[in-house]
Structure formats: structure tokens, C-alpha cells
Amino acid sequence: SNEARAEKIKVTMDTLIVYLVDGRKLEVPLAWFPRLRKASSSQRKNYRLIGEGYGIHWLKIDEDISIEGLLNISAFPLAFQNKMAA
């Protein structure tokens, strides 16, 4: 969908919250993203939206997350299964 783009995000101690331009809110566990989970609060806040909101990038921790990937977790079960086990 053209509207599956991030407008802003918030990272709590255990959750990544992504607010989409179409009004949806995605909440996923940080356990899926070990680098983000282990990052400091200031590192978590230091992100930028890339590709007009189609992805999120954290330079200091070398983490990139696509909105499509978050919306289609079942399309990538092994990738997310491995991250959940970490």
C-alpha cells in the first residue's frame, strides 16, 4: 500500500511503536531486533525515516527496519523466528 509509510516512531524498553501516515499504529517486541533492544535510550532516539517513510534507520547501531517487513511478518517467518530466539 502507498500509505504503509512511517510518520513517526517511539521505542520503549520492550516495544517498537510505529505510527503510519494512514493512522495505523504498529507495535512489535524489541526482542525481534536485538541491536535495538541492547541500544541505549539515546541511540534508540537517534533514528531517521528513510525512503519517504518506507523504512527506519539507526546509524549508530547499524539497524534498518522496513515497514513492509513489519506488516508482512508471516512472509519472513525464519528471520523473525531467529530474532525472537536471540
Image (cartoon, helix red, strand yellow):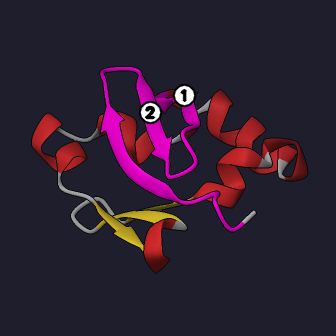
Q: Position of residue 67 (x, y in %)?
A: 60, 56
Q: Residue at x 46, y 41 (%)?
A: 19
Q: Secondary structure at mark 2?
A: strand
Q: Position of residue 66 (x, y in %)?
A: 58, 61
Above or below, 22 against 54 in this view is above
Which of the numbered marks, if any, corresponds to residue 27?
Answer: 1
Residue highlighted by disc 2: 17
Q: Which residue type does callout 1 highlight?
A: Glu
Report the amino acid beneath label 2.
Answer: Ile
Residue at image coords 31%, 24% = 12
Q: Is residue 73 left or right of residue 22?
A: right
Question: Where does the image place residue 36, in percent across and percent down from the top left?
Answer: 37, 43
Query: Residue 30, percent across and down?
Result: 47, 31
Q: Is residue 68 magenta?
A: no
Q: What residue is drawn where x is 31% and y is 21%? A: 13
Please tell me the numbered disc located at residue 3: none
Q: Quadrant of residue 26?
A: top right
Q: Earlier in the sequence, mark 1 or mark 2?
A: 2
Q: Nearer the viewer, residue 35 or 65?
A: 65
Instruction: Pick whichever, 86 or 21, lies toward us.
Output: 21
Crowd band around label 1 with a 10 angstrom C-alpha radius: few (<14), some (14–19), many (20+): some
Helix, strand or loop status at disc 1: strand
Where does the N terminus fall, quadrant-wise? bottom right
Is residue 76 placed above or below 33 in the rendered structure?
Answer: below
> Where is the C terminus found, in terms of image quarters?
top right
